[in-house]
Image: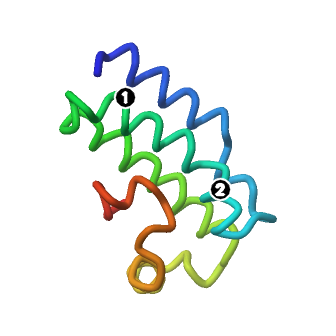
Amino acid sequence: MSTEARKAKGTRLRRMELHRHTNLTLDDLARRLNPVVRGWMQYYGRFYRSEMGPLLRRVSTYLMRWAMAKYRRLRADKRFRRWWRGVQQRSPLLFAHWAWVREY
């Protein structure tokens, strides 16, 4: 994955403004985000899987920002980590990028 491609994907993530859609549920976010991320994983991950790590962690960071904006109680780091692990345990296949990167 070239630097230009990584920047373009980061721009695409920024334009999606995931963290501002607090009216959506996690399932709605997954439906909106998974086709895009799955395509990146299939195309760039075929030969440059190690280069995908920073980009996929960035996706998780946007999801973290969404959760903290939607649920005020998750603004404390300890509570957020507990919630994040619980979501990943309850539905490990909810987001496509969780197959490769689970931290935020």
Going by the numbered disc 1, the residue's amino acid type is Tyr
Q: How is the image coloured?
A: rainbow
39 left or right, relative to 24: left
Where is residue 24 shown, x and y percent of the image? 76, 64
Q: Vertically, is 70 above or below 11?
A: below
Q: At 55% from the left edge and 27% from the top edge, which residue is drawn? A: 11
Callout 2 amino acid: Arg
Residue nearest the viewer, comparing 54 with 37 = 37
- The spot of residue 79 in percent (x, y) is 46, 86
Q: Quadrant of the N terminus?
A: top left
Q: To which residue does mark 2 refer?
A: 31
In this rendering, the answer to whether 55 lies above or below 31 is: above
State the residue lying farthest toward the right.
23
Task: Say which residue appears at 41% left-offset and 76% top-offset.
Answer: 88
Query: What numbered label is drawn on residue 13?
Result: none
- Tell me the CA gap for discs 1 and 2: 19 Å
Q: Is residue 7 left or right of residue 53?
A: right
Taking depth in this image into account, of 22 and 78 the one nearest to the observer is 22
Query: Which image quadrant for residue 99?
Result: bottom left
Give the secondary structure at mark 2.
helix
Which residue lies at the image location 53% right of the left edge and 52% below the top edge? 62
Give the labeled residue for mark 1: 43
Q: Position of residue 14 (x, y in %)?
A: 59, 35
The relative height of residue 14 versus residue 30 in the rendered view (above or below) is above
Query: Quick one: label 1, few (<14), some, or many (20+) residues within 10 Å?
Result: few
Circle 2: is it few (<14), some (14-19), or many (20+) Cα within 10 Å? few
Q: Secondary structure at mark 1?
A: helix
